[in-house]
Image (cartoon, rainbow, N blue to C red):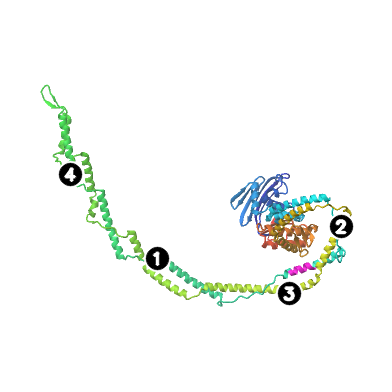
């Protein structure tokens, strides 16, 4: 289905710009406007977006600038084509799936399953080209349909066999110089002049058309509808009240069950056990703290004062040794008085002064003599004294084991025990609600059954009224059929005689001409013709295979197109027949011999039929560009009514016209 079309095109010669932003809807739509406002150009832009420059009426160079965007839905997916004069891009949703003119053209044909020629034959009827399908030769129509249903391979093989047969036959014809002995035609029994027969046949055909129409109306037999059985007597209002009350009880039950399920189960430990474990946790924590302190700062076994005495004694010994070493260096002697004094007297006096400051120091026993070891021992003794305030409250703590539950777990178990009363209340509520609901039927199901019965009853009454109307019309139609059946009983005989007379008159004229031209017999060419016959049999076998593939296509096309033709002509025309080679007749008359309007509606019926049979399952859209130009007012109205009736089969019908028939929506061009 087409969704939106936006385009802006400037013509190189005139500088004129055509631009529109059109939103399409489903159903039957009209594109209208004054002449040269671009109605047909919008259709050209749709075709250009889908199939590229091959869809343009001119060349792309005819446009100074050209840009168009088309959004459409195909097989449930949304696609957007963006085209300019030199490039194209195709998106599926927001995903880019093809870039470049050639790639986009190829991808669109792949998505649709057909190209521009099939699209134009079944989805579009262009302005002035409504009769294009009728102007095709049967072989061209045949190729068009075969390209869609995939019979190309069979046709190629059949063509090859046919070419061989035809070549042999041409040799035979060359040898016999295309001469055959003519045979006189047989004069039909009951021969009458052709104009006389045609006048009689026209009257009988009109009666037969009416008879066929009535038989079509009465072909469908309807049955008297059956009244539904009332199994539930309770009124809907009462059932709604009971169902609402039951739903409320179910809601209360579900709420109580959910609340009970949300409450935790009781703990296996009572409050006394949990309190005992909480106290044990405190004792264990104090013991752990004591062990941590003792591990961090062990007892050195000596006081700070004792270690300091040892260090002082060590310092005093060191000073004495230095004094002795300085005195050992010698003395100075005064030459005058012969007074002697140590050479380092000043330093010695200073050291003795320091030594006097230590007083009498005794070295404690059992301590190391090394100065560094004493410093380490002093730090340990000081650390031991520092932690005594922390150890004091823990001196009486004895080792103990850790309880089974952590403090958090103890609190969790206490929390679980706190919901015991509420769980008991909820269990009582749940049991009471279940007991209340157990004694009641399913009022919701009963309500739905009662509502279904009332809907069926209303539908039955509607069907009954429709059946009564149909029966009345059926009886009237059957009465008219009885009269017309007697009237048209000779139609077939007159039609056959008319055709036989027409053929005889033609053959008689041809025979007289061929008899005069025939002068010689031809020599035997049996060997060549036998070989040609073998190839013909091969071609016939392939044609038979092809015919079996298409055995359902042709009848479907003929049936659909005939129905459309009868609607558009108001019953004036009723039968379109296309044979296997797509030679087409309308009520027995060759398509190309019809009048302009007759040919137009026949070609339109064929286009719509081809679309339904071949392509509209893929792309259920039909676009008609002034297809009613050659039609009178009555036929235009019938054609519009047909298009409107196809909305159930086609998601979108778009008609370009000046006549403005009734439609679902109208797009005014050039506004």
Q: Earlier in the sequence, mark 1 or mark 3?
A: 1
> Residue 109: where, in percent of width, then height?
66, 52
Q: Earlier in the sequence, mark 1 or mark 2?
A: 1
Classified by dominant secondary structure, the portion drawn in magenta counts as helix
Q: Residue at x 87, y 52 (%)?
A: 520
Q: Which residue is mark 2?
A: 511
Q: CA distance from mark 4 to mark 3?
A: 138 Å
Closer to the camera in the image, 178 or 36: 178
Q: Which residue is mark 4?
A: 306
Q: Which residues are magenta?
A: 207-215
Secondary element under disc 4, as helix, strand or loop, is: helix
Residue 475's disc number: 3
Outermost residue on the left side: it is: 337
Q: CA distance from mark 2 to mark 3?
A: 53 Å
Q: Which residue is mark 1?
A: 263
Q: Earlier in the sequence, mark 2 or mark 3?
A: 3
């Amino acid at each position: 289905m087409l969704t939106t079309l936006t385009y802006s095109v400037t013509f190189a010669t005139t500088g004129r710009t055509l631009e529109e932003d059109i939103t399409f809807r489903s159903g039957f739509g009209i594109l209208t406007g004054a002449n040269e406002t671009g109605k047909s150009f919008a259709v050209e832009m749709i075709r250009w977006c889908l199939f590229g420059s091959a869809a343009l009426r001119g060349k792309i160079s005819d446009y100074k600038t050209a840009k168009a965007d088309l959004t459409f839905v195909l097989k449930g997916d949304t696609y957007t084509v963006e085209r300019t004069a030199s490039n194209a891009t195709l998106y599926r949703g927001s995903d880019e799936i093809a870039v470049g003119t050639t790639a986009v053209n190829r991808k669109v044909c792949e998505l649709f399953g057909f190209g521009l020629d099939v699209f134009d034959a079944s989805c579009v009827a262009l302005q002035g080209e409504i009769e294009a399908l009728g102007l095709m030769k049967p072989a061209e129509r045949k190729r068009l349909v075969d390209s869609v249903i995939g019979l190309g391979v069979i046709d190629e093989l059949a063509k090859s066999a046919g070419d061989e047969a035809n070549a042999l036959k041409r040799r035979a014809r060359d040898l016999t110089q295309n001469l055959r002995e003519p045979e006189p035609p047989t004069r039909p029994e009951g021969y009458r002049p052709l104009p006389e027969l045609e006048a009689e046949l026209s009257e009988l055909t009109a009666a037969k058309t009416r008879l066929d129409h009535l038989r079509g109306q009465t072909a469908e037999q309807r049955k008297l509808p059956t009244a539904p059985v009332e199994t539930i007597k309770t009124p809907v209002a009462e059932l709604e009240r009971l169902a609402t009350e039951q739903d409320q009880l179910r809601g209360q039950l579900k709420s109580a069950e959910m609340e009970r399920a949300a409450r935790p189960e009781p703990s296996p430990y009572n409050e006394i056990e949990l309190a005992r474990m909480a106290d044990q946790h405190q004792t264990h924590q104090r013991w752990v703290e004591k062990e941590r302190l003792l591990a961090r700062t062990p007892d050195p076994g000596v006081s700070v004062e004792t270690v300091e005495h040892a260090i002082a004694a060590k310092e005093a010994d060191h000073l004495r040794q230095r004094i002795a070493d300085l005195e050992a260096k010698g003395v100075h002697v005064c030459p005058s008085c012969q007074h002697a004094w140590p050479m380092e007297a000043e330093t010695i006096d200073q050291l003795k002064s320091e030594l006097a400051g230590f007083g009498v120091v005794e070295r404690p026993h059992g301590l190391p003599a090394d100065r560094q070891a004493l410093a380490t021992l002093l730090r340990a003794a000081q650390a031991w004294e520092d932690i005594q305030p922390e150890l004091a409250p823990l001196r009486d703590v004895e080792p103990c084991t850790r309880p089974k539950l952590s403090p958090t777990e103890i609190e969790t178990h206490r929390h679980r025990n706190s919901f015991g009363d509420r769980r008991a209340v909820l269990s009582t509520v749940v049991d009471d609600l279940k007991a209340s609901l157990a004694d009641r039927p399913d009022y919701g199901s009963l309500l739905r059954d009662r509502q279904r019965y009332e809907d069926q009853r209303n539908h039955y009454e509607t069907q009954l009224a429709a059946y009564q109307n149909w029966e009345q019309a059926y009886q009237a139609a059957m009465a008219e059929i009885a009269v017309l059946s007697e009237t048209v009983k000779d139609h077939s005989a007159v039609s056959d005689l008319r055709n036989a007379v027409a053929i005889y008159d033609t053959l008689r004229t041809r025979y007289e001409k061929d008899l005069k031209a025939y002068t010689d017999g031809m020599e035997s060419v049996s060997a060549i013709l036998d070989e040609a016959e073998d190839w013909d049999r091969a071609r016939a076998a392939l044609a038979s295979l092809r015919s079996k593939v298409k055995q359902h296509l042709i009848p479907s096309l003929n049936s659909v197109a005939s129905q459309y033709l009868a609607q558009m002509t108001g019953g004036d025309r009723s039968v379109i027949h296309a044979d296997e080679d797509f030679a087409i007749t309308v009520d027995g008359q060759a398509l190309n011999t019809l009048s302009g309007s007759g040919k137009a509606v026949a070609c339109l019926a064929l286009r719509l039929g081809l679309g339904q049979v071949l392509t509209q399952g893929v792309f259920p859209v039909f676009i008609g560009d002034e297809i009613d130009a050659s039609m009178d007012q009555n036929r235009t109205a019938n054609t519009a009514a047909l298009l409107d009736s196809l909305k159930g089969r086609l998601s979108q019908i778009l008609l370009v016209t000046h006549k403005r028939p009734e439609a679902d929506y109208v797009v005014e061009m050039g506004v």
